[in-house]
Image (cartoon, helix red, strand yellow):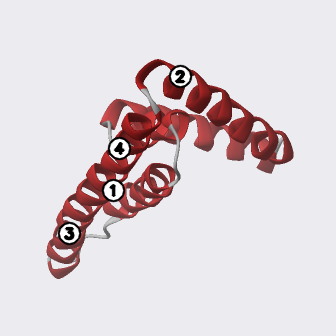
Amino acid sequence: MIFLIFIFIPIIEIVIFITVGSNIGILNTIAIILLTALVGIYLVRKQGLSLLFKAQRNMSQGIFPSQEIKGGIFLLVSGLLLITPGFFTDCFGFAMFLKPVQDFVSKQASNYFRSRTR
């Protein structure tokens, strides 16, 4: 499965690059890719600091920061996707910032791991 992801995602990205580049031009395509990377870095940094402060506040109150850890994992994944050049990965990277998407993915992952441990 992972092998197929590493094969098909670059193919999808190349097709999208060619399509977008032929429609809006190479320089505009490169500018959009750089802009999404910069916006992604900004959002990851901003949200990462917010998660860090929430985790510190919870730990000082004796509360285990489980939601912040989960948010940190999603932040790491979204940051990696946004830094990777491409429109397809950027869509998934920006989607990972959304709470409903995080809840859906974590529920699916939880169900997957529960079924594997039985």
Among the two numbered marks 4 and 3 on one chain, the one whose residue lies closer to the N terminus? 4
User: Which residue lies under the disc numbered 1?
Assistant: 67
Among the two numbered marks 2 and 4 on one chain, the one whose residue lies closer to the N terminus? 2
Q: Position of residue 110 (x, y in %)?
A: 59, 43
Q: Nearer the viewer, mark 3 or mark 1?
A: 3
Q: Label 4's element? A: helix
Residue at 50 percent across and 24 percent down: it is 20
| Label 2 crowd (10 A; few <14 / some 14-19 / many >=20) | few
Q: Label 1 amino acid?
A: Gln
User: Which residue lies under the disc numbered 4?
Assistant: 31
Task: Please tell me the numbered disc located at residue 49.
Answer: 3
Q: Quadrant of residue 11?
A: top right
User: Which residue lies under the disc numbered 2?
Assistant: 22
Q: Position of residue 114 (x, y in %)?
A: 69, 44
Which residue in the rendered view is the most extreme toward the bottom? 60
Q: CA distance from mark 2 to mark 1?
A: 43 Å
Q: Label 2's element? A: helix
Q: CA distance from mark 2 to mark 4?
A: 14 Å
Q: Position of residue 50 (x, y in %)?
A: 17, 63
Among the two numbered marks 4 and 1 on one chain, the one whose residue lies closer to the N terminus? 4
Q: Label 3's element? A: helix
Q: Label 3 amino acid?
A: Leu
| Viewer-nearest residue: 92 or 31 | 31
